[in-house]
Amino acid sequence: MNTETTSSFSFDSIKELMDGFDPAALLPELDTVFGWIELVCRVAVMIGPVLLLILGLTYLFLSPKEANHYLGYRCYYGMGSVQAWRFTQKLGGLVLGGLGLVLTVVMLFLSMSLRGMAVEAMVWRAAKCLIWEAALAILANLAVTGAAFVTFDAKGNYRSKRR
């Protein structure tokens, strides 16, 4: 009886094959990874202001002439009448468009300063920029909604001045 195995599988052949293999060669170069991190940080910092600018221009020039639930700056006090709707569209467009324009310029300069920074510092600066963008967008939204509240009642009529 033949006790030798006829299969070609042997640990020596696998060891021979794996001797020249370097698992680190499968990983991307660090320069490439850091380049992608810088690009992601720049895009993340710039996308908020550009969206605010686009929203502002949309509210100014492309909003419907009458209140609807699909397109436009919608708030409770701006939906009551055509006058209230047009007021909130114009004010929302001016405030959000102006904020978007200012933030686009500021964040463009800040995103240019990300080059050459350490990765951790770059990511933290981008995170801080995102937090500031979100806070300013919320304040702009509250300002437009507050102005509509002060100007109009729930039915869309101008509020009477108190004497």
Image: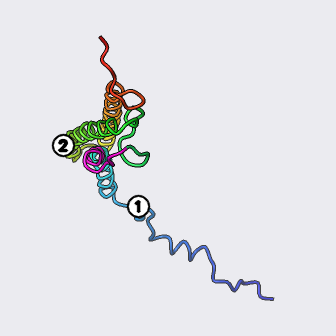
Horizontal and vertical percent position of residue 64: 33, 49
| Residues packed near mark 2 inside 10 Å, few (<14), some (14 to 19) or many (20 plus) | some
Q: Quadrant of the C terminus?
A: top left
Q: Is residue 15 left or right of residue 96?
A: right
Compared to residue 28, the image places residue 141 above or below, namely: above
Tag of residue 105:
2
Question: Quick one: 160 or 51, which is closer to the camera?
Answer: 160
Quadrant in the rendering for residue 72: top left
Image mark count: 2
**x 48%, y 70%: residue:** 19
The residue lying furthest to the right in this view is: 1
First to last magenta residue range: 52-66
At mark 2, the secondary structure is helix
Q: Earlier in the sequence, mark 1 or mark 2?
A: 1
Q: Mark 1 highlights which residue?
A: 27
What separation in Å lies between label 1 and label 2 (alpha carbons)?
A: 37 Å
Pointers 1 and 2 in contact (C-beta within 8 Å): no
Secondary structure found at label 1: loop
Which of the pair 67/113 is nearer the observer? 67
Q: Disc 1 marks which amino acid?
A: Leu
x and y percent of residue 134 in the render?
35, 36
In this rendering, position of residue 27 left or right of residue 1 = left
Q: Residue at x 34, y 59 (%)?
A: 29
The front one of 50 and 130 is: 50
- Crowding at dot 1, Cα within 10 Å, few <14 / some 14-19 / many 20+, comes out as few
x, y percent for residue 7: 67, 83
| Rendered image coloring scheme | rainbow
Residue at image point 19% right, 46% down = 112
- Left or right? Give the position of 96 relative to 79: left
